[in-house]
Image (cartoon, rainbow, N blue to C red):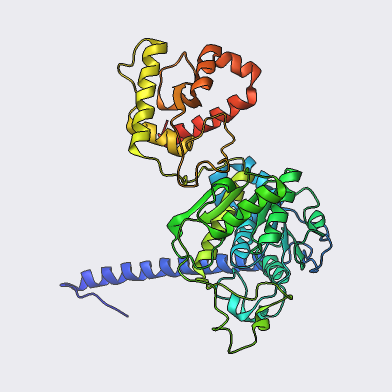
Amino acid sequence: MTTTSSSGSSGGSSSSTVAFAAGALAGAAVSAASLYYIYRSQQLAAPRHPPAAVAASSQPAATHTASLKDFENDEILAEHLTRNVQFFGIEKQKAIASSFVVVIGLGGVGSHAAHLLLRSGVGKLRLVDFDQVTLSSLNRHAVATRQDVGIPKATCLQRHFQQIMPEAEVEAVVSMCTADNIEQLLSGQPDFVLDAIDNIHTKVALLAACKQKGIPVLCVAGAGAKADPTRLRIVDISESSIDPLARAVRHKLRRECGIPGGIPVLLSTEKPRCQLVSMVDMAEGNPLDYQIVPNFRVRTIPVLGTAPAIFGMAAASFILCQLAGSPFYGEPIIQLTGQQYDRALMRLQQREEEVFGSSEDLPVDRDDIILLLREVYRGFSARADRQVLPGGDKGLMRNTAHLHFTRWDAAKPPTVDNLVLLTAEEAEQHDAAGLQWLQQQEPEFVKKVERLLDVVRAQVMY
């Protein structure tokens, strides 16, 4: 026992009494905390719902008795999702809980994405992959252990997910995605599809099918041989001129499927740091040992495990925000010049003088123009499809010489959240028609622009 020296006997007695009382209180607090911990551990471990495991097959999973849809009425589920509810709000989190997401490709990217979708409360997941867990995949897989080596990746995730979120409906499909089974894999009206496939032909077939069916899909480009997490971007597939895999997918989608764009792709602007493993490096063993199925992916690319994990988490974040109806608009891939920003500001000043009589005290500066031209409108007219046309701009460039800013609502001042970017002809028509006419004749276009202006208001703290 530690004692404290004192100058008098009465002082020593008083100190001992205080120390004894403090120790008693501390002991009581520790005991209470221990009892609560034991109680909560028993409560969490107790079988509160019927087993939700689903056999790994290509058939739909059995219906679960428990459901995430009513998570707010369940004490443990509500606590599990507390931070999500604080972030999104209860109604948007309920939308996530009612969602059905298909993840195709369960390697480093797909496993991490599926893992975070599950933990974030997605109610139903269909996990698709033909491949097995290998020792060499443990450096990047989200949940696999050495005990999982040799079993299908879909089955592995399903088993672990049952321990993490037993209330979720998780369907494991041990099958390669092919043109013959895409219809089955996309059955059941999924709310979103994640393409984490690394085979270009299968990737294109899946993206084309989703586009034709109107199913939202996110394409993930190559994570192999990458390391820099600051280089990730989500862009339209028509802008994918940097990543080799995304670029090849863009060409095949346009040439073979007639799809020039309109599909978001997650890619890295980082150049690959290393090349495919050469046949010489593989010569010591049998190259066919690198295959799971004949003629598929004989050569491999080196992978730093952190890169696919970051890709997967970025993909999950994008999908969750889409499901919640709170999409984000990431850092654009384009790089505009100072001359483009100066020209846009000068044209706005000229337009204010010609249409509204004066440009004095214009409440917009060059920084505002940079925000609007690059980050909000991304160098496109508000009426454009935001797709780079073949033979035109490349992913890092954008011609803005034909674009002009004008007031969205002519009755309000030209503040940063009241400017719309249009072509010269579109701007003339907009100024002549007025916002009230647009609200009656083109309500969807009005909603589109208002969403963009809401982004501006959020960024400038309005």
In depth, the one of 101 and 183 nearer the eye is 183
The quarter of the picture where residue 14 lies is bottom left
Question: Farthest residue in the left direction?
Answer: 7
* 334 relative position to 234: left or right: left
Question: Farthest residue in the front direction?
Answer: 391
Q: Position of residue 350 (x, y in %)?
A: 36, 18
Q: Quadrant of the N terminus?
A: bottom left
Compared with 377, 355 (above or below) is above
Compared with 416, 435 (above or below) is above
* 266 relative position to 16: left or right: right
Q: Position of residue 245 (x, y in %)?
A: 58, 59
Rendered residue at 36%/13% (across/down): 353
Q: Quadrant of the C terminus?
A: top left
Asked if residue 358 can be seen in this view, the reply is yes
In depth, the one of 225 and 247 nearer the eye is 247
Q: Position of residue 278 (x, y in %)?
A: 55, 78
In depth, the one of 151 and 386 nearer the eye is 386
Total marks in image? 0
Q: Position of residue 419 (x, y in %)?
A: 45, 25
The quarter of the picture where residue 436 lies is top right
Asked if residue 99 can be seen in this view, the reply is no
Question: Farthest residue in the top direction?
Answer: 357
Rendered residue at 55%/32% (across/down): 451
Rendered residue at 59%/27% (across/down): 447
